[in-house]
C-alpha cells in the first residue's frame, strides 16, 4: 500500500502497443500540453509528482550529501554535522553565502515542488468529464503540499517570490514577496483546501493527505508565524478527530509501526525502485556517525523522577541512559545502551538512534522508513504552546496536554514535579522542554529556535558555556565553532544562481555588501 504514492515513472504509462500508423500519431513516449491533462489518470500521475517532490533529499529526506529538514536539527543545539563538506555545516558556522549548497538546494527543491503543485491546481479544472469531487480533492492535496514547502521557504529565506500559477519563460522574472504575503497566501489557501479533503482514506491510500493532515499543517503555519489563538483552535479541531498516541515510543520510529493512529501527515518511502529514505542512513553495523547529537541535547532529558540531571540523585554520569526519560534511549545511543543487540561499552560520545534501521543488514541508505511530518504528539504540543502564548488558557488544560505526552513514557506528571499555579513563562518553558525531547531529530528544533528568537542565544551558549570544550575532551570529531551574525543570519540569502537568472529578484538587504 505504500507504493501507492511512491515515485511514478510517468513515461511508462504512455508507452503502449504501437500500430503501423505510428508516424501519424502524437508521441507516445513524451509529454506535452497536447497529450497530457486529458484524463483523471493524468491528474493522478501529476499529483503523485507533487508527493514525489516531498521525498527530495533536500526537503523531507536527507543523507550525507543532502540536507532536508532532518539536517536542520544539526544546525541547532540538538546536533552537528561531522564532516566539513556536509550541507548545513557552513550555516552552523556562520560561513554560508549565496552559493552555499544547503541554501541553493532548499530553494531549488522547494520551488520544484511548487511548480508541480501549481500545474495540478491550474490544469485539473480544465480536464473534461472528471468527477468534480475527485478533482477538488486532488487540488486540495496539491495546495497542502504547496503550503508545506512555502512554509519552509518562509521560515528560512523569509521573503521569496510567491508563484501560484504555471509560468512561461517570459513570465519567469518575478520579484520577491514579503514574508507576510506568503503567510497570508498559505493561510487562505489552506482554509480553502481543508474543505475538500477526506477525513479518512482506505489502507490502499495511506500517505495521501486527509482533512486532519491539512488542519494540522495549518495549525503549524499559524503557530510558527504568531497566530496563537488560531493555532490553538485549529490544533483543537485535530485533537477532536480521533487520533491517539502510539503506546510504545521506543518502537514508534520503525518501519514495523509507521502506519498507526498517531501519524497525521507522513512522507512515504520504500525500497522499491530506489525510493527508500536515507535521512537516518549509516554504513554497515556502525553508528550513524556523520551527524551527531550535541551534549546539550543529551543532558536535557530528565531522570525518571522528572528532575534535570543536575538536580536528580538518580543521574549516573558513567551510564547516562540509566534512570532517564525512556525517550533518551529511543532517541540516542549512549554508553551502557544496546545497539543491534550488543552492549555499548567504553563509548564516550552519543549517536542518533531515532529513525535508524537497526535490526537488519540491508542498505541503510535505502530504507523503507517513512518520515513523519506531523504526529498527534506534535498537535498536542502545538495546542499547549499556542494556548499559553495566546494568553487565554486554563492551566489544567495545558498541563493535561503535557501529561498525555509524558504519560506515554511513564514520566511524572507536571503537577507532581513542577507543581501548579505556574506562571505563563514557567508553563512555556515546560512546553518547550517537552517539545524538544519528544521531537528531537524530526526537523523541528531549528525552526523552533528561529521563531522563538533563540537561535543566536544557543549558538553563543555553545561557544561560551563550555560545551565545545567538553566535546573536544570527550573525543567528538571535527568540533568547530558556531557563529551567528545578528541580524544577517535570521534569514538565508537568496541563491546567487537565482539572482543571475531572475533580474527582477533582489538580494536581502542584510546580505548585501556592508549589510
Image: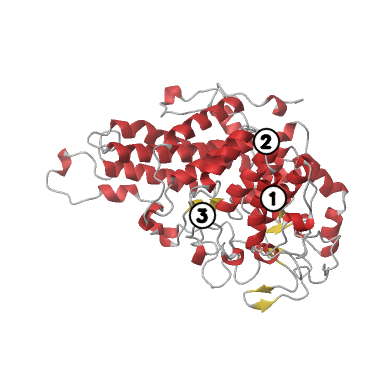
Whole-Å distance between the Cαs marked 2 and 3? 28 Å
Reply above or below: 97 against 444: above
Task: Name the side, left or right, on which 289 lies relative to 214.
Answer: right
Q: How is the image coloured?
A: secondary structure
Task: Name the side, left or right, on which 204 lies relative to 466.
Answer: left
**Crowd around label 1: few <14 · some 14–19 · many ≥20 (10 Å):** many
Mark seen at residue 263: 3
**Crowd around label 2: few <14 · some 14–19 · many ≥20 (10 Å):** few
Question: Element under label 1?
Answer: helix
> Which mark's residue is nearer the viewer, 3 or 1?
1
Picture coordinates of residue 126, whole percent (x, y)? 29, 31
User: Residue 221 is drawn in which quadrant?
Assistant: top right
How many numbered callouts? Answer: 3
Q: Which residue is mark 2?
A: 392
Whole-Å distance between the Cαs marked 3 and 1? 23 Å
> Which mark's residue is nearer the viewer, 2 or 3?
2
Amino acid at each position: 500500500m505504500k507504493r501507492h504514492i511512491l515515485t511514478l515513472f510517468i513515461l511508462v504509462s504512455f508507452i503502449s502497443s504501437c500500430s503501423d500508423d505510428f508516424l501519424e500519431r502524437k508521441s507516445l513516449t513524451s509529454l506535452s500540453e497536447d497529450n497530457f491533462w486529458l484524463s483523471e489518470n493524468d491528474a493522478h500521475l501529476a499529483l503523485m509528482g507533487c508527493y514525489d517532490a516531498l521525498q527530495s533529499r533536500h526537503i523531507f529526506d536527507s543523507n550525507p550529501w543532502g540536507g532536508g529538514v532532518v539536517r536542520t536539527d544539526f544546525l541547532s543545539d540538538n546536533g552537528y554535522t561531522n564532516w566539513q563538506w556536509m550541507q548545513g555545516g557552513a550555516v552552523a558556522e556562520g560561513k554560508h553565502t549565496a552559493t552555499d549548497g544547503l541554501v541553493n538546494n532548499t530553494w531549488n527543491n522547494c520551488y520544484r515542488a511548487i511548480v508541480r503543485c501549481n500545474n495540478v491546481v491550474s490544469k485539473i479544472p480544465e480536464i473534461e468529464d472528471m468527477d468534480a469531487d475527485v478533482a477538488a480533492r486532488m487540488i486540495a492535496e496539491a495546495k497542502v503540499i504547496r503550503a508545506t514547502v512555502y512554509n519552509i521557504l518562509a521560515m528560512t529565506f523569509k521573503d521569496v517570490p510567491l508563484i501560484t500559477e504555471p509560468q512561461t519563460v517570459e513570465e519567469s522574472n518575478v520579484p520577491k514577496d514579503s514574508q507576510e504575503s506568503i503567510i497570508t497566501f498559505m493561510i487562505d489557501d489552506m482554509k480553502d483546501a481543508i474543505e475538500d479533503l477526506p477525513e479518512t482514506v482506505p489502507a490502499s491510500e495511506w500517505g495521501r493527505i486527509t482533512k486532519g493532515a491539512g488542519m494540522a499543517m495549518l495549525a503549524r503555519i499559524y503557530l510558527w508565524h504568531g497566530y496563537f489563538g488560531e493555532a490553538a483552535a485549529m490544533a483543537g479541531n485535530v485533537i477532536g478527530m480521533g487520533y491517539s498516541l502510539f503506546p510504545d515510543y521506543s518502537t514508534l520510529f520503525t518501519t514495523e509501526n509507521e502506519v498507526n493512529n498517531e501519524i497525521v501527515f507522513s512522507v512515504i518511502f520504500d525500497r522499491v525502485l530506489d525510493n527508500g529514505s536515507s535521512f537516518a542512513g549509516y554504513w554497515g553495523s556502525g553508528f550513524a556517525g556523520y551527524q551527531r547529537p550535541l551534549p546539550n541535547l543529551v543532558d536535557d532529558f530528565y531522570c525518571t523522577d522528572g528532575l534535570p540531571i543536575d538536580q536528580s540523585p538518580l543521574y549516573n554520569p558513567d551510564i547516562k541512559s540509566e534512570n532517564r526519560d525512556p525517550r533518551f534511549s529511543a532517541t540516542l545511543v549512549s554508553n551502557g545502551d544496546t545497539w543491534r543487540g550488543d552492549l555499548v561499552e567504553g563509548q564516550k560520545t552519543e549517536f542518533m538512534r531515532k529513525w535508524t534501521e537497526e535490526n537488519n543488514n540491508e542498505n541503510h541508505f535505502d530504507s523503507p522508513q517513512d518520515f513523519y511530518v506531523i504526529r498527534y504528539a506534535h498537535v498536542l504540543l502545538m495546542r499547549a504552546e499556542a494556548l499559553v502564548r495566546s494568553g487565554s488558557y486554563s492551566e489544567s488544560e495545558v498541563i493535561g496536554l503535557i501529561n498525555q505526552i509524558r504519560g506515554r513514557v511513564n514520566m511524572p506528571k507536571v503537577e507532581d514535579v513542577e507543581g501548579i499555579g505556574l506562571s505563563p513563562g514557567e508553563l512555556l518553558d515546560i512546553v518547550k522542554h517537552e517539545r524538544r525531547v519528544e521531537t528531537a531529530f524530526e526537523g523541528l528544533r531549528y525552526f523552533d529556535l528561529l521563531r522563538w528568537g533563540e537561535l543566536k542565544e544557543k549558538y553563543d551558549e555553545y561557544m561560551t558555556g563550555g560545551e565545545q570544550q567538553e566535546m573536544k575532551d570527550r573525543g567528538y570529531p571535527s568540533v568547530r565553532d558556531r557563529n551567528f551574525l545578528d541580524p544577517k543570519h535570521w534569514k538565508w540569502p537568496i541563491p546567487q544562481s537565482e539572482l543571475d537568472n531572475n533580474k527582477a529578484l533582489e538580494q536581502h538587504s542584510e546580505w548585501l555588501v556592508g549589510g
